[in-house]
Image (cartoon, coloured by chain):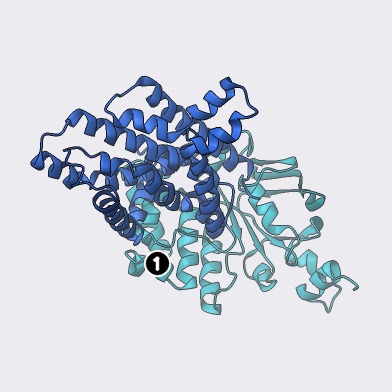
């Protein structure tokens, strides 16, 4: 399988502060990479650079062989992105927001109808289709955000904390959705919830202070903790500070 | 297949009308325009069948109302995070800037268009020079575009709508009065005449007065046109430069 997403020596500075420091990794089709780290580790900054929203200070992001900075249009077609907190235009209805995203993506009306129907069914949005987004529950809002991310059937999905703030049932639903899409796509999910790694990821990477600490299968991460360890132990051991 | 500019434009325009923004703006605009025309402008006492009493207030009305429309254009997207959605769609910053600006301009155009009963009134009461009125409407619409483009540009600089509003009103105020003695006297003591003329030439009032006399002069059109294009280009640069920060 070719690597759909290639991150090479990615670095981002904000003034004197280095939020992301020399991170490299690749994600192949069929892989679900769990991007782990404590709050403030640089997860969102990395996700934003991968999505082409934030230009990197150094390093490159390539999606399907195209550089994110040099070919923004091509990249945006191949990439589905759920920003942190799933921001949405609150005054719009679900139907209108899907229609907007589809037409902004230049979809022909036939394809637009087909794709919109698909995501509505997939994320079970029928019942709220004509409601304003700001009146929806958190779970529904997140599902609308995910619908926007997969609307154009991208090969690469970048989901920033897709289950954050959801109740256990909603978390389960989102994870099931990610699992069913996993085969045909390369997926990166950022999270600070470790059970997520067990639940959906084929590979996990832990970062702290902008640096990559470990990258491997969930099993190899566990081996790191010794026999009796859990993922929590690995996480604390690697990212915990002595102060 | 829809052009991305049209997609943004349509989304923006719809969002004015699904929220109270459109109705409040139009109601206040019409109310204030009529109050100023009939009370402050002495519409009837002038005894002339023209809309001078109406159009003379437009620069001052727009100063606040158009800045209020423009302040949310980018600040709100930045604050709610939807800018991240917009900028990761296959839309360039320039297309988004143009789409948003056109939607707001069309919207102010609708508000301006709804003042047509005044035109009907003067036509009924007397025999106005319709050329002058058309010129005034064109001038007023162009001027609204100028205020909007400046406001949109300022809005791109901050996620705080109050700051966007206050700064935009201040900048627009300078553009409005730059041809008046209060500004020119300040500069005249120590600046050469050429610079003084340059400052005065930026005045919205001067250009609008020319147009509202019914003289559609190419220079006034070029002034507003280039001001709008310049502000939107700057707007695009700001959006690109501040992306993600």
Q: Is residue A139 left or right of residue B30?
A: right
Q: Quadrant of the N terminus of chain A?
A: top right
Residue holding disc 1: A124
Residue drawn at 49 percent across, 45 percent down: B151
Residue drawn at 38 percent across, 40 percent down: B144
Q: Residue furthest right?
A: A242
Residue drawn at 81 percent across, 53 percent down: A17
Crowd tier of the residue under label 1, counting other residues whose Cα lies within 10 Å: few below 14, some 14–19, many 20 or above: some
> Percent from the top left, x then y, of residue B37?
26, 48
Q: Quadrant of the C terminus of chain A?
A: bottom right
> Percent from the top left, x then y, of residue A136?
42, 71
Residue drawn at 43 percent across, 51 percent down: B64
Q: Which quadrant of the figure has residue A216?
A: bottom right
Q: Is residue B112 left or right of residue A183?
A: left
Above or below — where is A122 with respect to A6? Answer: below
Q: Nearer the viewer, residue A146 or B201?
A: B201
Q: Chain A drawn in what color? A: cyan
Q: Is residue B82 visible?
A: no
Q: Nearer the viewer, residue B120 or B231?
A: B120
Chain that appears blue: B
> Percent from the top left, x then y, of residue B40?
30, 51
Q: Is residue B242 visible?
A: yes
Q: Is residue B154 left or right of residue B68?
A: right
**Tally of numbered tags:** 1
Above or below — where is B91 with respect to A228? Answer: above
Q: Which quadrant of the figure has residue A55?
A: top right
Helix, strand or loop at disc 1? loop
Q: Chain of mark 1?
A: A
> Percent from the top left, x then y, of residue A174?
53, 68
């Amino acid at each position: 399988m070719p690597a759909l997403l290639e991150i090479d020596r990615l670095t981002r500075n904000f003034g004197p502060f280095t939020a992301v420091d020399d991170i490299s990794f690749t994600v192949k089709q069929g892989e679900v990479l769990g991007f782990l780290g404590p709050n403030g580790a640089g997860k969102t900054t990395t996700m934003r650079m991968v999505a082409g929203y934030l230009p990197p200070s150094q390093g490159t992001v390539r999606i399907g062989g195209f550089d994110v900075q040099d070919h923004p249009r091509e990249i945006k077609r191949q990439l589905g992105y759920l920003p942190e907190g799933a921001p949405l235009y609150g005054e719009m209805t679900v139907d209108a927001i899907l229609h907007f995203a589809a037409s902004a993506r230049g979809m022909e009306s036939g394809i637009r109808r087909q794709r919109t129907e698909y995501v509505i069914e997939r994320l079970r949005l029928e019942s709220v289709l004509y409601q304003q987004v700001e009146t929806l529950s958190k779970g529904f809002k997140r599902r609308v955000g995910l619908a926007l991310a997969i609307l154009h059937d991208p090969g690469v999905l970048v989901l920033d904390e897709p289950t954050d703030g959801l109740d256990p049932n909603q978390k389960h639903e989102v994870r099931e959705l990610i699992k069913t899409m996993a085969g045909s796509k390369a997926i990166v999910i950022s999270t600070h919830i470790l059970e997520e790694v067990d639940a959906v990821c084929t590979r996990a990477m832990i970062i702290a202070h902008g640096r990559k600490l470990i990258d491997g299968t969930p099993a190899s991460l566990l081996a790191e903790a010794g026999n009796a360890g859990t993922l929590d132990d690995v996480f604390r051991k690697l990212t915990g500070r002595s102060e | 297949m829809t052009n991305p500019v049209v997609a943004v434009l349509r989304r923006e325009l719809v969002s004015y009308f699904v929220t109270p923004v459109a109705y409040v703006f139009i109601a206040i605009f019409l109310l204030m325009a009529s109050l100023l025309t009939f009370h402050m402008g002495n519409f009837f006492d002038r005894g002339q069948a023209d809309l001078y009493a109406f159009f003379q207030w437009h620069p001052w009305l727009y100063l606040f109302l158009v800045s209020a429309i423009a302040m949310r254009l980018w600040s709100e997207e930045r604050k709610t995070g939807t800018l991240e959605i917009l900028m990761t769609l296959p839309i360039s910053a320039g297309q988004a800037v143009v789409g948003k600006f056109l939607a707001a301009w069309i919207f102010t155009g609708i508000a301006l268009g709804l003042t047509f009963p005044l035109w009907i009134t003067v036509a009924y009461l007397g025999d106005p020079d319709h050329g002058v009125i058309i010129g005034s409407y064109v001038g007023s619409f162009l001027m609204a575009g100028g205020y909007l483009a400046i406001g949109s540009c300022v809005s791109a600089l901050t996620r705080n709508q109050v700051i966007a509003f206050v700064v935009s009103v201040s900048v627009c105020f300078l553009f409005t009065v730059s041809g008046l003695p209060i500004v020119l006297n300040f500069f005249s003591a120590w600046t050469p005449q050429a610079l003084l003329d340059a400052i005065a030439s930026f005045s919205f009032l001067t250009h609008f007065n020319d147009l509202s006399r019914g003289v559609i002069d190419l220079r006034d059109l070029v002034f507003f046109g280039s001001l709008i294009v310049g502000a939107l280009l700057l707007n695009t640069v700001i959006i690109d430069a501040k992306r993600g920060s």
